[in-house]
Image (spheres, rainbow, N blue to C red):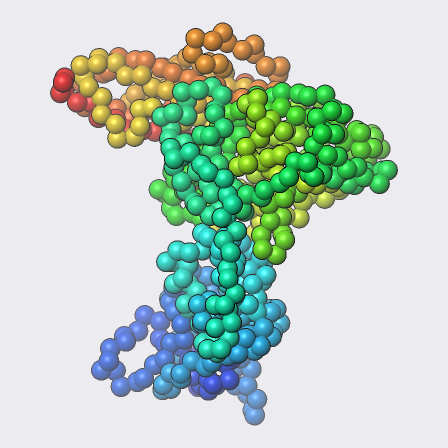
Amino acid sequence: MLLFRYCRCLTQFGPVLPRRPQAFTAAAWCAIRLVGGSSSSNNKDQRWEHPRHSPSWRQALAGLLAGTGAVLAYGLHHHKAQQTDAVNVLVKAKPAQLPIFSQEEVTKHRSLQDGVWVTYKGAVYDITAFVTMHPGGDKILLAAGGALEPFWALYAVHNQEHVLDILSEYKVGELRAEDQKKQQSVASSDPYSSDPERHPVLQVNSLKPFNAEPPPEILSDSYVTPAAIFFKRNHLPVPWVDPSSYELQVDGLPGGGLKLSLDDLKSHFPKHTVTATLQCAGNRRSEMNAIKQVKGLNWGIAAISNANWAGARLRDVLLEAGYSPDVARWARHVQFEGLDKDVTGTTYGASIPLNKAMSEEGDVLLAYEMNGEPLPADHGFPLRVVVPGTVGARNVKWLSKITVSAEESSSHWQQNDYKGFSPATDWDTVNFKSAPAIQELPVQSAITAPANGAVVSRGDEEVTVKGYAWSGGGREVVRVDVSLDGGKTWQVAQLRNSDRGQPPEPSPPPGRAWAWKLWELTAPLPPEAQQLEIVCKAVDNSYNMQPDTVAPIWNLRGVLSNAWHRVKVTISDDKE
């Protein structure tokens, strides 16, 4: 008789039920090794453990036997489950040899109802149970019934050892040799082969897609960040667009829509210039990783930059397309769609509130210039949305379509990513539908110099601390406090909104402070100190302040990381 213990997924029948390979006996397929038990070769009981039932995923298996029939149910418990949540079953069956499947058989498994099978390097995997746990949502179903290689060429972040370890747990067989040869004969082109050249000074977090940030020490050297070192955040390959044939489509308004060429945008609408800071939602994620591992690129403090953007106002274009006050009675959002796409043709998308898009004070641009030049390829050539004061993810690049709608964008990046959660929420309990999409970002500041771990000479007698500060929603940073002793005492830094030697820019109108402030403090070295813990915190004109520590704002995606920034510096008595 099978002994089982229920996990909370145990009653999931139907779609999550895996299909048993034909070569497996029922006993072998249902068998699972005692979790945490001995695997000594001297053990008289031969116990078989299917890879999918390894302790790392704590999958539970239960058999319910009655009369002449048998009903099998199994539950998939996530990685945080304890050993007691797994099923302990004693089975005296020897492992069966993994079966060989044809590509035709694999192709039959393309849904949760029929099972979700994929191939990778000649092996067959039944990933049905993993679909609901996939961090990328149901996009994993796009690979169902076929090879993973084309998708992993696109989402190269999967090519990591721990991902391959997870995949190995779901192996159910081998692909027939002749079908393997067919797969190998199809040349797999690299979708990133035409990506633009990047400056070698950038610190790369991901090559494919390309994501990188400048060294912090040069970030605050210029009030306007040069395009070459402006942080790069790409979700997909960079598309190459012919500006002469480029066309922007505007939908969702009375009148049947509007199509505009790049020349139309430049000649028919007034050109506006806005200096605005863009910040990735994951900026400073590395500090959350130091508390507890999160999922996402390990950004430092430089996934933020400032530029002069120029183009047509979104408001003007929507008015031309037929917007009227009546539209606001039913519409709530403006959706954007980019030209960057995956192998299935799925494009990057996002949306912003309609009131932000239509506000005369919102300054939302359809930008075709960056720092006085045409947009570089990495930054959205020939056209992108710039939504000042809003998280970078909504500033869609390579813009192809605008839709006025009653609904938010249905894009994965709007619905299942870029949202904040409680520190108590983990991947077992997260419900992305329960949280709003990030729009405005909280107040932020960081120290760009000196670097953490730097050594300063006591003979210098003083230390100069530099950094940046910014707040979302057009809220102006009015003060940055700096401490040399971990927050016991504080000094006020000097703020600037222009480069050194240049006259300061006029203060922006209330609610339209889109650009960062750079700041600096020079202070004497404490006479007896051997080490400094330098801390900074910013205050905006709504008196929002940064939290003092990371732990209370930790979240499973590592977004909205804006605690006091801290660096430790050693004081050397060597005066050379």
Quarter the C terminus occupies: top left
Judge whether 31 appears above or below 117 on screen.
below
Q: Position of residue 76 (x, y in %)?
A: 49, 67
Using the image as rendered, state which of residue 505 and residue 370 is in the foreground.
Answer: 370
Q: Residue at x 36, y 80 (%)?
A: 48
In the picture, measured across the screen, residue 539 lies left or right of residue 38, that is right
Quarter the N terminus occupies: bottom left
In the picture, measured across the screen, residue 400 lies left or right of residue 141, that is right
Q: Residue at x 61, y 69 (%)?
A: 111
Using the image as rendered, state which of residue 536 and residue 146 is in the foreground.
Answer: 146
Quadrant location of residue 549?
top left
In the picture, measured across the screen, residue 354 lies left or right of residue 566, that is right
In the picture, measured across the screen, residue 247 lies left or right of residue 373, that is right
Quadrant location of residue 494?
top left
Q: Residue at x 33, y 23 (%)?
A: 449
The reply to whether residue 388 is in sight is no
Q: Position of residue 531 (x, y in %)?
A: 22, 25
Q: Position of residue 87 (x, y in %)?
A: 42, 73
Using the image as rendered, state which of residue 499 and residue 467 is in the foreground.
Answer: 499
Judge whether 421 appears above or below 65 on screen.
above
Using the image as rendered, state which of residue 242 and residue 339 is in the foreground.
Answer: 242
Q: Position of residue 32 (x, y in %)?
A: 40, 77
